[in-house]
Image (cartoon, rainbow, N blue to C red):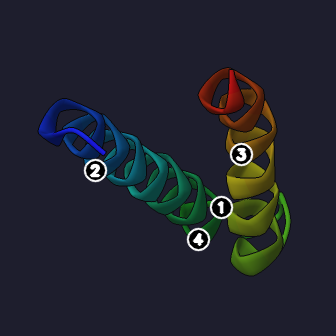
Amino acid sequence: MSSLALLVVLLLVLVVVLVVGAAAYLVHRHPVLEAPVFVAIGAAGLLAACIVPIAVR
């Protein structure tokens, strides 16, 4: 794997962590929405569902 591909994978991981953390923080600030763990897992699953088909190509 080239260094460019490794850099792209690292950036994707960082973006996923940022989005999941932001979703968990949002739900933590507004507990009426849902439990933070479920929202974080849902956000990670949604991002993975969007990124995996692109990465496999």
Examine the rendered structure and indicate whether residue 28 appears above or below residue 57: below
- Indicate which disc residue 28 carries: 4
- Indicate which disc residue 27 carries: 1
Residue 24, how many percent across, how many down? 58, 65
Q: For marks 1 and 2, give the CA distance.
A: 26 Å
Q: Looking at this view, is 25 or 52 the one in front?
A: 52
- Residue appearing at x 18%, y 31% in the figure: 4
- Indicate which disc residue 48 carries: 3
Examine the rendered structure and indicate whether residue 10 appears above or below residue 30: above
Q: Quadrant of the C terminus?
A: top right
**Could you tell me the amino acid type at mark 2?**
Leu
**Could you tell me the amino acid type at mark 4?**
His
Query: Badge 2 is on which residue?
Result: 10
Q: For marks 3 and 1, give the CA distance.
A: 20 Å
Q: Report crowding for label 4: few under 14, some 14 to 19, many 20 or more residues within 10 A (C-alpha).
A: some
**Could you tell me the amino acid type at mark 1?**
Val
Q: For marks 3 and 2, give the CA distance.
A: 14 Å
Disc with the residue nearer the chain's start (3 vs 4): 4
